[in-house]
Structures are given as structure tokens and as C-alpha cells.
Amino acid sequence: MRLGSAKAVAALVAMSASTFTYVTTEVLPIGLLPLIADDLHTTRSAVGLLVTGYGLVVVVASIPLTRLTHGLPRRGLLAGLLAAFVVATFASALAPTYWLLLASRVLIALSQALFWSVITPAAGALFAAEVRGRALSVLYAGSSLAGVLGVPAGTWLGQQAGWRTAFLAMSALGLVIAVAVAALLPDIPAGQSDADRGSEPDAGRYQVLVVATALAVTGAFTAFTYVSPFLTDVSGFDSSATGMLLLVRGIAGVAGVVLVGLIVDRNPWLTMLVAVAVQAAALALQYLLGAAQPAAAVTIAVSGLTLAALSAVLGARVLQVAPGSSDLASAGTSTAFNVGITGGALIGSVLLSQAGARSTALAGALLTLAAVAAICAEPALSSARRAARPRPVSA
């Protein structure tokens, strides 16, 4: 199937919806934290582990699970992963104890660890190479909409009808999507599409991509994890205003995905460089000007735009420079992304207690600037370029 095929577009929409469900379910406990803690008679910090522990599982399991399932047909694998998501999310909704809820969350995280490795090449295989980046931006639009629509809607539903109802709703949505993916996705064996390999395979460039991703995401989440204290303590916003500001940030993230879709196929490397450089500038200005409310609002929205843009461009970059199979390359960047989320939250936590909320923006800017340097150095570190250099003639 290629662009123009209604079935290909429908399959892409179904897969985009699957990214929406996974991301929403991953972070849904944050909005429902007090309700879950009270119902299961546990602490709020323990409920917080349902999110941080989830991310750690994804970090540890992505590459091993991808190696284990390498070669399996993508349609059956994705449908199976979504089926596991449906069952485990349903189990989360029924869990009578905290530990059973945690166990079900681990199962969801294991399915997500493999999901992110498979979904990019599966979606890329549906479209011609010249529009593949645009298609992948549609794929990742679902994950951006999770923050704008999914988590707020799930939180509202949980507050109105109980936290278990929110998880039941996600399980039901996952079932619909699983059926759609199974019906619409072609049964292409792994390795039979040009999207299963990099269009310009280069081990050196890929290694830099992994490092730059980890640095940029760590920088983003060092600042973003504690953006609420920044808004109240540094910018002087009332706590009631933070929800609206975060909504604006989420909407800006959707705009970032749209922008990436318009330009990424022309030059994925340059698109990534611009996105990360703008993130560094936004976080630096947040640190310098964040005491002024208008500046804080604008810089936080821009950093949301750039993080979503980075997420969207990663798939195109993997399908460009993957030195081997694109699913294993996707597993590597997924691991780097989740390392950045976990590492950023940890760094931000230390800085918040030791130096205050304003320091998280500075640290985020410096880490992102290191990512910019890495991306700039990528062409010089290209394996193809090094191999093409003339070797000195021995006397």
C-alpha cells in the first residue's frame, strides 16, 4: 500500500490512535493519583511509582523484546501487543490491591516497550519513501494528543465516575483499535519492506542520534517535570492557572507535530537540529525571563512545541540512518527517550530541592545545548564519511 490508498491512510489513523491510548494510559495515574491512593489505601508516592516504574520497564525491556520478536509479521505482533494492552488495562481497572495494579502496569509497560520499536517501521512501510516522514508525523500526532485530550479527559472521567472507570474506558478504546489494526494493516513479513532498513544506513550517525535524543529529552524533562512549581514559585501564577497553561503547551505540541510533517521529508537532520536548537533557546529564555508571566507562558509553550517536534522527527531519522534493522534502531531511540524522561525527572528533583525551581530551566537548557552540539557533530562522525577518507600511504 502507498499514499493514496484509503486503506493505508485508515491503517495509519488506527496506529496513531494506538499511540494515543498507550501514552494516555502511561501517565493517567498522575491525574488520578489521590483517588487511586485513597481507594487502595496506599501513599501518593507509591501511586507515583506506577508512572516512574512503568518508564523504567520500557527502558530495560525495549531492546531485549525487540531482539526476541525480530522477524515476526508486524500485523500479528501489533494486534497481539494491543490485545495484551486491553487485557492488562482491564486488569488494572479491577485490581483490588496496589500490588496487583502495579503488576498489571508492568504488563502494559512490557507491551509498550515492544510497541514503540515496531510501530515506526510498520507505519513507514505503508507509504513511499518521499512522504514517509509526513506519515510518521501523523503517527506521532496521537501521542501528542494524549497530553492535550487523553489525560485531561481520563482525569475528568475518573473524577466523575471513579478512577477504575477511566481505565475501563482505555481498555475499551484499545479493543476497538486492536480490531482496526488487525483488519487494516497488511500482513507484510518483517524484512520485506524498504522501511525495515535505513535509507542511508550509517552506524556513526545513528549512535549520535541516540546520544542527542537522550540529552535533548533529559533537558526537556528536567524543566517540564517541575514546570508547575516554576509557574507558581518563579512566575507568580496562581496554582489554578497552571492547568490552562499546560493545555496551551499541549496545543503547541500538536502544532509542532504539524510543522514537522510539512518539512521533515526535505531534510530530517536539519529538522531535528532546528527543533532541538529552539528548545535550548526556549529553556534558556525561560530561565532568564521566567519571572515575567507573559515570557514564562510563551517559553513553556514553545518548549512543548519543540519536544513534540522532536518526538515526531525521530521516526524519520531512524528510518534514514538505521545501520541494521529499523525495529532494533527504533528500540534504541525509544530506550534513549525513556532514559531522558527518567533522568530528567531525577535531575529536576535534585535541583528543585537544592537550588529551586528556576534552576531546572537552566539545567534543561544546558543539557539541550549539549544535544545541539552532538547533532552538529553528526555529519563529521558519519561512518560513511570516515570510510571515504583516503588512508595515508605507508612509506
Image (cartoon, helix red, strand yellow):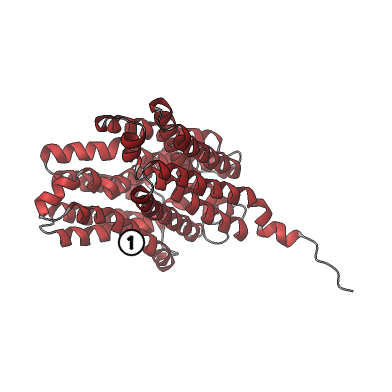
For label 1, the crowd category at 10 Å Cα-Cα, with few meaning under 14, some 14 to 19 and many 20 or more, is many
Q: Residue at x 31, y 40 (%)?
A: 229
Extreme-right residue of the structure: 395
Which one is nearer the viewer's eye here, 250 or 365?
A: 365
Which residue is at 31% across, 39% downward? Answer: 228
Q: Position of residue 289 (x, y in %)?
A: 45, 31
Q: Quadrant of residue 390?
A: bottom right
Frontmost residue, 329 versus 216? 216
Q: Residue at x 35, y 40 (%)?
A: 227
Q: Position of residue 208 (x, y in %)?
A: 57, 55
Residue 80 visible in image: no
At 29% from the left and 50% from the top, the residue drawn is 26
Q: Position of residue 51 (x, y in %)?
A: 28, 53
- Residue at label 1? 57
Farthest bottom residue in view:
395
Q: Position of residue 119 (x, y in %)?
A: 41, 51
SS class of the residue under badge 1? helix
